[in-house]
Image (cartoon, helix red, strand yellow):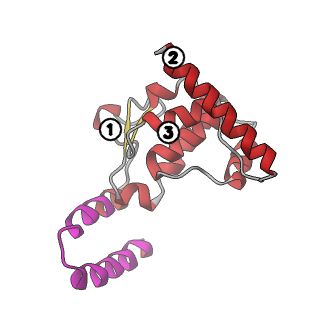
Amino acid sequence: MTDISQSFERAYALVKQNIEASGSSVQLPGSRVVLYLNTCTPGILDVQELLDADRTEFLQMAYYSLLEILPEQEVIRRWQAKTELSDWAYRKAVLDTLMQNPEVAAKGRVIRNNIYAEADAAQGYAGRSLKQRLLSAGYQVSRRLPLCIKVPLKKLAMKLLMRG
């Protein structure tokens, strides 16, 4: 395992060096984040795995687990500006914000071992609202429908859900 981690660190350093030498403005996430991206299961966030991550790493790892994308630099800067929050409150706010994202709710993403949730963590969902549960159920049912039915049904459901 040591050989693998050393090889990973060398490869990461080489990629970072090449990006910097090319003059690109691409921001490469930290090596811990990149390693996490290669080992996590998309759609499932196990909070226990992120306990020793710093704030930015936590944000990037949580985003990737639940949305399958890394946050843009502007999003990272906005979250970094929230210095008034304790680490606990910061992480709770990140997870609450992500769970309110319609895409996370619609795809039935799961947070395991969520020590930041006030709801029962055994359910695997952090404070899912009725709207989120409906979106999730609708998404699961609509996957089986033909496209000619799915599109108008989705438009109607979104129109109804956005009212309330």
Highlighted range, magenta: 135-162
Amino acid type of the residue that numbered disc 1 sits on in the rendered structure: Gly
Q: Secondary structure at mark 3?
A: helix
Which is more foreground, mark 2 or mark 1?
Answer: 2
Number of disc labels: 3
Q: Residues within 10 Å of mark 3 (few under 14, many from 20)?
A: some
Residue under the image location 46 percent in, 16 percent down: 1
Residue 96 spot, x, y in % from top left: 51, 46
In the image: residue 32, left or right of residue 124: right
Q: Secondary structure at mark 2?
A: helix
Residue 23, numbered circle = none
Residue 150 spot, x, y in % from top left: 25, 78
Residue 37, numbered circle = 3
Let me know if residue 12 appears in the view.
Answer: yes
Q: Earlier in the sequence, mark 2 or mark 1?
A: 2
Residue behind mark 2: 3
Q: Secondary structure at mark 1?
A: loop
Q: Earlier in the sequence, mark 1 or mark 3?
A: 3
Residue under the image location 36 percent in, 61 percent down: 131
Amino acid type of the residue that numbered disc 2 sits on in the rendered structure: Asp
Which is more foreground, mark 3 or mark 2?
Answer: 2
Which is more foreground, mark 1 or mark 3?
Answer: 3
The secondary structure making up most of the magenta span is: helix
Residue behind mark 1: 124
Q: How many angstroms separate mark 1 from mark 3 (CA)?
A: 21 Å
